[in-house]
Amino acid sequence: MILLLILIFSLQNSMLYVSASTFDTYYARIMYDEVYLYKAPIEVEDYSNIYFSLPRTYFVELLESSNNQFYKVNYLSFTGYVKKDAVQTIVGKPITPYLENQNFRVYSEQSRDMRSEPSTLSGSSSQIVYIPLYSRNLTYYGTIKGEQLVDGRTNIWYYCKYSADQDYYGYVYSDFCDEFNVNEIPLNTEKVSYTSAPSFDTTNAQENSLPIENKTTAIVIAILTIPAIIFVFMILKSGKLIAKDGRKSNKEIKDY
């Protein structure tokens, strides 16, 4: 009986691990222009707290409810925050959640520095890397409003990745770039069904964060436990039959 109880307890724990892997992943569509990916869940509307604006009609993966105003989200390789009223939760996972593979080049003889902020006011302290003329290995992620480097031109900077000896991430001034037009970014026309905002349960989230190898082990244990319980049951049942037969034999001897 002790062995049976141990096996049942193991089965219950295994089923807990298995069920933890079945919770949904939530995605939400970016509904408007100038929806920002924030660094912290606070309403500070400048580049000290903003990575870039997210492209309308694409999606973010919802991770948790940070507070009444913000979700914590994933977008590509970035983790940040978006305002809840700027996105709409969908059913399931979209086929193309993110805007990808939007490349451009720098062509200006003027500043070609990638910077940690969309401004030159901090001087050399904000310089990340110098980008050679006509470099094309830049990948666009989003835009942000910053310093207007050329009078009468734009104040838009691109947040991007520059791939050279390593990958660099930062801002380049959009007026010094070409072969790309942010106004021509294709919309994501994928048809989806919308649903109410998810209620993120902390307990479920913690269970779902268990390592994959632990979940796999638990499933194996669950599969092996069921035959073991049947085997123990058969042993116990056989023992009862033997005992019953033994008592009958003793009675027959006494009668004889």
Image: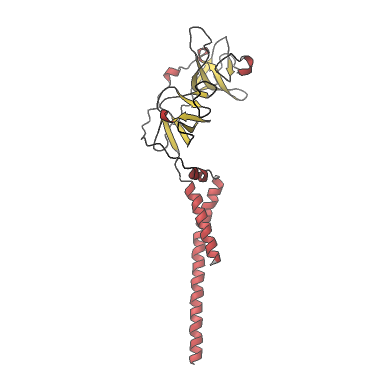
Camera-side residue: 239 or 67?
Answer: 67
Residue 123 visible to an observer of this rendering: yes
Q: Is residue 3 above or below residue 121?
A: below
User: What residue lies at 49% left-to-right and 13% top-to-bottom?
Assistant: 155
Q: Is residue 156 left or right of residue 31?
A: right
Residue 45 in picture, x, y percent from top left:
49, 22
Q: Is residue 235 above or below residue 64?
A: below
Residue 133 in picture, x, y percent from top left:
58, 13
Camera-side residue: 140 or 60?
Answer: 60
Camera-side residue: 102 or 47?
Answer: 47
User: What residue lies at 51% left-to-right and 60% top-to-bottom?
Assistant: 8
Q: Quadrant of the rendered structure where residue 106 is?
A: top right
Q: Is residue 180 above or below residue 21?
A: above
Residue 30 in picture, x, y percent from top left:
42, 28
Residue 76 visible to an observer of this rendering: no
Q: Farthest top residue?
A: 151
User: What residue lies at 47% left-to-right and 29% top-to-bottom?
Assistant: 82
